[in-house]
Image: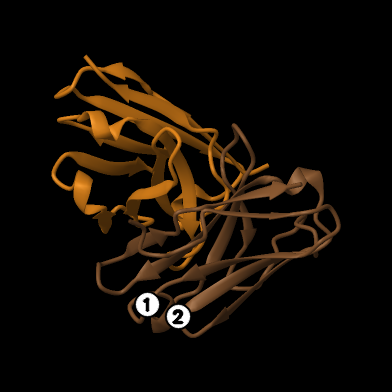
Chain colours: A brown, B orange
């Protein structure tokens, strides 16, 4: 049971827009901690996708965007491409445990 | 190029020990928090431990406290994870990752991971 809740799977056709939610609580996202997103392609290590709620590292296409409100955050992917098929994870911190890092359970994106 | 390369994984019996290493290059290692994150087969990411730039602060997930020890050698630009009293549930790919400059933040980059299998 992950501290941050994500849908197990989402899907969309090429060119469409999908969103992945990340729901936390008053001790993590709601406490003001930033949310970060990672993309994990099959058989590879995770890669930073969005930092600090809505910042794209160099090299990440602007098709990827992040937002945060209250105790939740979202990752939006527009103009879906087959190569976007991957697992996506949100990450934050939790004030109930010292310097405790918390991850979402992950969401499998399928491009139909 | 910023790079992290893990080593030391392998097959170990329950109750045994293993020491993972992570060699860093391409950045000022001593200026960053560092972390270990693991991923059991077919499951999601689980944070394991953090260590501050000078090693003065260390934090662990509850399930590994008193069994795992994170450490670093800034002169060698290396991060370590000493794992004792290993259990089957510790079986996972272990990733070394950079965790923040002045404070803990996002994880970037990640190493390629090293597989630890605990089995008799």
State whether residue B36 is above or below residue A23. Answer: above
Residue found at x 60% / y 71% = A74
Determine whether label 2 and label 1 are within 8 Å by CB. yes
So how many labels did they put on this image?
A: 2
Tag shown at residue B12: none
Tag shown at residue A25: 1
Report crowding for label 2: few under 14, some 14 to 19, many 20 or more residues within 10 A (C-alpha).
some
Q: Nearer the viewer, residue A1 or A66?
A: A1
Residue found at x 48% / y 61% = B100
State whether residue A79 is above or below residue A72. Answer: above
The image position of residue A26, as x and y in percent, is 35, 82
The image position of residue B52, as x and y in percent, is 35, 57
Mark 2 on the same chain as mark 1: yes
Horizontal side of residue A54 vs B23, given as left or right: right
Residue B110 is drawn in which quadrant?
top right
Residue B80 is drawn in which quadrant?
top left
Residue found at x 57% / y 45% = A46
Q: Residue furthest bottom?
A: A70
State whether residue A106 is above or below residue B36. Answer: below
The image position of residue A57, as x and y in percent, is 69, 61
Quadrant for the N terminus of chain B, please: top right
- Specify the subunit that label 2 lies on: A
Q: Nearer the viewer, residue B76 or B50?
A: B50
Judging by the rendered image, the residue that carries numbered circle 2 is: A71
Report crowding for label 1: few under 14, some 14 to 19, many 20 or more residues within 10 A (C-alpha).
some
Q: Earlier in the sequence, mark 2 or mark 1?
A: 1
* Disc 2 from disc 1: Cα separation: 5 Å
Dot 2: what SS?
Answer: loop
Residue found at x 82% / y 50% = A81
């Amino acid at each position: 049971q992950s501290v941050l809740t994500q849908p197990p799977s989402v899907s969309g056709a090429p060119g469409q827009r999908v969103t992945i939610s990340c729901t936390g609580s008053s001790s993590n996202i709601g406490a003001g901690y930033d949310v970060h997103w990672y993309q994990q392609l099959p058989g590879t290590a995770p890669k930073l996708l969005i930092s600090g709620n809505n910042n794209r590292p160099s090299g990440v296409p602007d098709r990827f965007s992040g937002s945060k409100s209250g105790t939740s955050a979202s990752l939006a992917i527009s103009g879906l491409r087959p190569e976007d098929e991957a697992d996506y994870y949100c990450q934050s911190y939790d004030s109930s445990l010292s310097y405790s890092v918390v991850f979402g359970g992950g969401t499998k994106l399928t491009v139909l | 190029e910023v790079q992290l390369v893990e080593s030391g994984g392998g097959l170990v019996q329950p109750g045994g020990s293993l020491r993972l290493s992570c060699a860093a290059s391409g950045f000022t290692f001593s200026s960053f928090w560092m972390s270990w994150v693991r991923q059991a087969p077919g499951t999601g990411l689980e944070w394991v431990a953090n260590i501050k730039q000078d090693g003065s602060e260390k934090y662990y997930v509850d399930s590994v406290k008193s069994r795992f020890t994170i450490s670093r050698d800034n002169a060698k630009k290396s991060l370590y994870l000493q794992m004792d009293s290993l259990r089957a549930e510790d079986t996972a790919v272990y990733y070394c990752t950079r965790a923040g400059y002045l404070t803990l933040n996002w994880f970037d980059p990640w190493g390629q991971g090293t597989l630890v299998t605990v089995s008799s």
